[in-house]
Amino acid sequence: MSSDIFQDIKNDFPIFSNQINGKDFVYLDSAATTQKPNDVIDSVVHYYKNCNSNIHRGIYSISIEATELYEDARSNIGKFINAKSSHEIVFTRNATEAVNLVANTWASQNLKEGDSIILTEMEHHSNLVPWQILAKKLNLKLNFIEIQPDGELILDKLDNLFQENAKFLSLTHVSNVLGTINPIKDIISKAHEHGITTLVDAAQSVPHMPVDVQDLDSDFFVFSGHKMLGPSGIGVLHAKKTLLENMEPFLYGGDMISNVSLREAQWNDVPWKFEAGTPNIAGAIGLGKAVDYLNQIGMDVIHKHEQELYNYAIDRFSELKDFKIFGLENKHSTGGVISFSYSDFHPHDIATILDGESIAVRAGHHCAQPLMEKLGVPATTRASFYVYNDTSDIDKLFNGLQKVRSVLT
């Protein structure tokens, strides 16, 4: 797919018809959340306008339609990541809730005092704090796979880590700060050799590249809809069905039960036993439509496009004095994310000046404070690319950074 086609894709996103500060809007914060195409917005509006009702319960026409749309979305998302069955797809609010679900169900039921959980030094807080809490609660150990200066994981000590009573491994597929694409298939395989159960935080991979959970052989796999053109408030937990069947529910109440008496209850089948109460019906429907949109472009094409934008940006930014990219040496295996420092300018000042140029970037610790400490900085500025970006956006960012220098020096 040519760059011209990606330029045309912007027409599918109504937010880009707006101007900010009298200038065309350049959005470079897709690692935080993505913009929504008309197809997704229209699918949510259609639900509320035409079949707004609760699902699974009603025997009238619009409830049946809503249920079909909701369950079709589940099936669609399952196929998107090549799940063995749509019954392995659990809808949550986001990836964070999915991690907490696993921590408070499978992990709480299966880990015991003295066991260790293996994480990495590049984890998002959402895949760190839940395990800190569980470790304190159950007196578990937390051990970490370290990172090299170029942003890659140091993997030659895995056997030692995995032999230290390790029972669970939870790691990110793609770093939201460095863009590093971790070799999770190899890591998972080695973990399974040691009898270790695995979870993959795929919030930054599923939106950007082809993903096959059967090929990866992950036990648990989580991602968020809002990072892949879908609505906010909808996420996904994929888990092997045998694991789901042997886990206790996370939340209790309506729709997750099969039978209730005054003193006891029996749980529904998976995945519904993990979806208590009225779910985010519109969100699931919108996420299903987002998957359709991504499939129309092709995940291989999207990944290649982001790599081309990344390489183009690296070439352009090499012209800037005192410009440092974190993880640059890892250029061969990165997602469309660039975290950088620029001279001694504070990231917040950089972002503020760029906002005046109608360019949106992220500034801060990116919910990865331990990684910031490892990098030796309190914060970075981050630009992240997606389907609606093209080289003209990077040119505008480059010009904006030149203005940053002129303003701050």
Image (tube, rainbow, N blue to C red):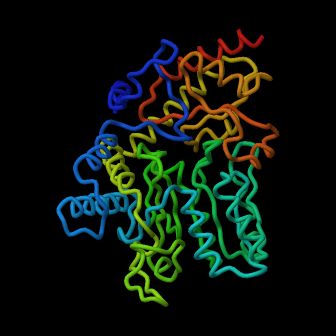
Considering depth in this image, is 260 or 21 the residue closer to the camera? Answer: 260
Q: Position of residue 67 (x, y in %)?
A: 27, 63
Outermost residue toward the left in this view: 61
* In-image side of 55 versus 301 (left or right): left
Q: Residue at x 31, y 62 (%)?
A: 54
In which quadrant will I find the C terminus? Answer: top right
Q: Is residue 303 above or below residue 108?
A: above
Q: Position of residue 74 (x, y in %)?
A: 35, 62
Q: Is residue 246 above or below residue 17?
A: below
In which quadrant will I find the N terminus? Answer: top left
Q: Position of residue 189 (x, y in %)?
A: 58, 69
Q: Position of residue 221 (x, y in %)?
A: 52, 63
Q: Is residue 40 above or below residue 94?
A: above
When asked about the image quadrant of residue 98, the answer is: bottom right
Q: Residue at x 76, y 55 (%)?
A: 146
Outermost residue toward the front in this view: 262
* In-image side of 86 versus 403 (left or right): left
Considering depth in this image, is 29 or 50 the residue closer to the camera? Answer: 50
Q: Is residue 315 above or below residue 85?
A: above
Q: Residue at x 68, y 79 (%)?
A: 111
When asked about the image quadrant of residue 254, the answer is: bottom left
* In-image side of 288 versus 364 (left or right): left
Considering depth in this image, is 42 or 247 the residue closer to the camera? Answer: 42
Q: Residue at x 71, y 10 (%)?
A: 407
* In-image side of 360 versus 401 (left or right): left
